[in-house]
């Protein structure tokens, strides 16, 4: 909104007609300059639902209040990681070493353990490749990244969670903090946008 130079009332930008004074004479074109509109004093507009929310200081975002990754996002990331782990496991176990089933299982376990320990730890910034694609990260409950030992404990917890018919993994869908058993064992959250 612009302000009329003659009477001081507000007129829309680009308009040459004032509601009070009428049109601006053509002989005296006046450049339109942005001026801050005058706000009449009055009570502030309150957008909060309660007066307590209006006066409360904003809460800082902590890892406890950060948005947590849900069951389906984590499941899709785990499938992506499974494909990434399976390719070198099959190539190394079957094609290169010509290992039997037990040998291939051992190679697959070693590659999987190495993959998760590296990427869940501070070396991989708490993100496997599947988690990177879906913008998720594993952090401890204090917000710091895991050490290699913490990542190993989380992996052992994941194995335990799968051994009990997958109940420990499905637990993520029903837990208030979206923690599976392996998260509770290692003291971790999987957060988004952190």
Image (spheres, grey):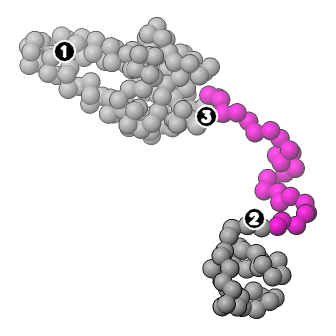
The reply to whether the magenta stretch includes residue 176 is: no
Q: Residues within 10 Å of mark 2 (few under 14, many from 20)?
A: few
Looking at the picture, tell me which residue is in the foreground, 45 or 94. Answer: 45
In the rendered view of the protein, which quadrant contains the C terminus?
Answer: top right
- Corner quadrant of residue 99: top left
Read off the residue under disc 2. 36
Judge from the rendering whether residue 140 lies leftward or rightward of residue 74; answer left or right.
right
User: What is the spatial separation of the Cα atoms under label 2 and label 1, in whole angstroms?
Assistant: 73 Å
Q: Secondary structure at mark 2?
A: loop
Viewer-nearest residue: 122 or 183: 122
Residue 12 visible in the displayed image: yes
- Whether residue 9 is visible, yes or no, is no
Residue 1 position within the rendered picture, expressed as x and y whole percent measured from the top left:
71, 73
Instruction: Please name the residue that numbered disc 1 is placed on.
Output: 104
Query: Between marks 3 and 2, how big is the CA–CA gap?
Result: 38 Å
Answer yes or no: do the residues labelled 2 and 1 have beta carbons within 8 Å? Answer: no
**Which span is picked out in magenta?**
38-64
Nearest the eye: 166 or 191: 191
Residue 110 to residue 132: above or below = above
The picture places residue 83, in percent across and down from the top left corner, at 26, 30
Category of crowding for the residue at label 3, using alpha-carbon neighbours closer than 10 angstroms: few (below 14), some (14–19), many (at least 20): some
Residue at 83 percent across and 41 percent down: it is: 56
Residue drawn at x 86%, y 44% is 55
What residue is pinned by disc 3? 66
Q: Give me the C-alpha separation between circle 1 and circle 3.
A: 40 Å
Q: Say which mark, if any, is on residue 42.
A: none
Q: Residue at x 65, y 76 (%)?
A: 31
- Label 3 SS: loop
């Amino acid at each position: 909104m612009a302000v009329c130079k003659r009477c001081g009332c507000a007129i829309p930008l680009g308009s040459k007609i004032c509601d009070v004074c009428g049109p601006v004479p053509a002989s005296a074109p006046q450049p339109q300059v942005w001026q801050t509109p005058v706000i009449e004093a009055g009570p502030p507009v309150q957008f909060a639902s309660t007066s307590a929310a209006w006066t409360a200081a904003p809460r800082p975002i902590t890892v406890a209040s950060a948005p947590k990754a849900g069951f389906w996002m984590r499941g899709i990331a785990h499938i992506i990681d499974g494909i990434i782990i399976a390719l070198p496991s099959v190539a190394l176990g079957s094609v290169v070493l010509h290992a039997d089933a037990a040998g291939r299982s051992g190679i697959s376990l070693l590659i999987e353990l190495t993959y998760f320990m590296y990427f869940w730890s501070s070396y991989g910034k708490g993100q496997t490749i599947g988690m990177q694609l879906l913008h998720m990260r594993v952090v401890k409950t204090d917000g710091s990244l895991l050490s290699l030992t913490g990542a190993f404990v989380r992996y052992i917890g994941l194995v335990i969670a799968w051994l009990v018919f997958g109940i420990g993994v499905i637990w993520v869908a029903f837990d208030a903090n979206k923690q599976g058993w392996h998260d509770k064992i290692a003291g971790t959250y999987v957060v988004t946008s952190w």
